Image (cartoon, coloured by chain):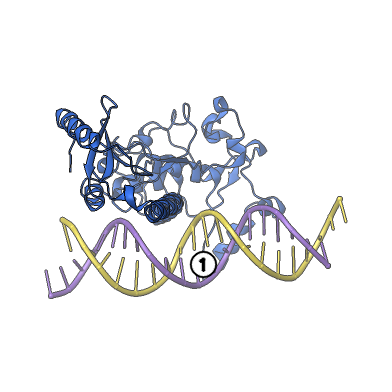
Chain colours: A blue, B purple, C yellow
Amino acid sequence: MELALSLGDTSKPFTFLDKPANLPSKDPPGFCIATGKGFDEKRSDAEKRGSSDPPVQLDLLPFTPVLRSQPPSQLRIPWLAEPCGAARVLDVNLFPAATEDGDDGTSLSSPSSAVSPFQMDFSMRNGNAEFGGRNRREQQEGEGTRASDDEENGSTRKKLRLSKEQSAFLEESFKEHTTLNPKQKLALAKQLNLLPRQVEVWFQNRRARTKLKQTEVDCEYLKRCCETLTEENRRLQKELQELRALKTSQPFYMQLPATTLTMCPSCERVATNSTTTNQTSSTINNNASQLPVELSLSKPRILPFPNAQAQATQTQAQAQAHQIPSS
DNA sequence: TCCTACCCACTTCTTACGTCA
DNA sequence: TCTGACGTAAGAAGTGGGTAG
């Protein structure tokens, strides 16, 4: 079985940054995971989707309960519904804002860059409680106090939460492409008012999280496969015991050739091949992967001799007529 | 061969949140 | 009901090794 990971249509060009104004209007942000052959097989996104097997898909929408609880028609990235000028609260990350000149390395001098003309100012946050944008601590503390604290203590490690809006935007980008080229990284960084390094780290961590989820899904699938095979093995062992018991109790009949039923999948007729027990096993082993499927009888068919031979010959002819491999 | 940039795996550390006394 | 301590999960960021160009 082939496992496939679906993370959106990665064959598409990186269009997210080109259309931020409409991006969440149709589908809620999120991603889809399937038991897949490989998140590891990066740089081969097209190959990931090459399987004809329908992958087992998981819906792993990463969004907050606030968003997910909304009806689908209302599922849209909140900041897009707000005029950019409405924001007034300080950025939670409080990184030095990327200037128009891009002095922090996020400069995009080319007008043909991936930056959308729809520039969202993530240095400001909407204080509207509708979006749940402010966490408890932020509500408890004075706005912007953490900024000055961090800036005063330059030795402390800055590890601040991205805002929901920033995370949502990054998620949307991740849906488009799980990896970024430098241009996309710079564009995202500038658009989200983050450092390129932050965008890069976010994508690294996001890939790691996806892989972890995928591993969990694969593990669960293999677990179920193992359970199924264990049950099948148990059933076959029981069947074998029954056959052995029958052989012990009825040795006369067991001198007869064992019978293997061969079913033609097209006409659903059953062909009977007479063979020895060893040959039957050999047939099963050798042709296990071939069609038609060979059915081993739970109990040997007991045919009145010599009619058995005649019928076997007849069914063998049928089998050959239907391209059924006979032992 | 060295350098750079990038990725991944692993880890550290911060933050948010739930639980409980 | 409120509050503070505590545990824990999630996530941002650091580190080191591998690799491609």
Residue A150 visible (yes or no):
yes
Q: Is residue A117 above or below residue C20?
A: above
Residue drawn at 56 percent across, 51 percent down: A92
- Decide which of A273, A310 is in the foreground and name it: A310
Nearest to the observer: residue A250 or residue A222: A250
Q: Position of residue A63 (x, y in %)?
A: 54, 42
Nearest the viewer among A178 and A253 is A253
Q: Eyeballing the image, is A84 above or below A219? A: above
Picture coordinates of residue A79, whole percent (x, y): 54, 35
Q: Residue at x 33, y 47 (%)?
A: A253
On the image, numbered disc 1 is attached to which residue?
A: A157
Percent across and percent down for residue A110 are 27, 41
Q: Position of residue A233 (x, y in %)?
A: 41, 53
- Whether residue A38 sits left or right of residue A98 in the image: it is left
> In the structure shown, which secondary structural element does the residue marked by tag 1 occupy?
loop
Quarter of the image where the C terminus of chain A is located: top left
Q: In front: A158, or A234?
A: A234
Residue A164's image quarter?
A: top right
Write the residue at 26% across / 40% down. A46
Q: Callout 1: few (<14), some (14-19), or many (20+) C-alpha neighbours within 10 Å?
A: few
Residue A324: quadrant of the picture: top left
Amino acid type, residue under disc 1 in the picture? Arg
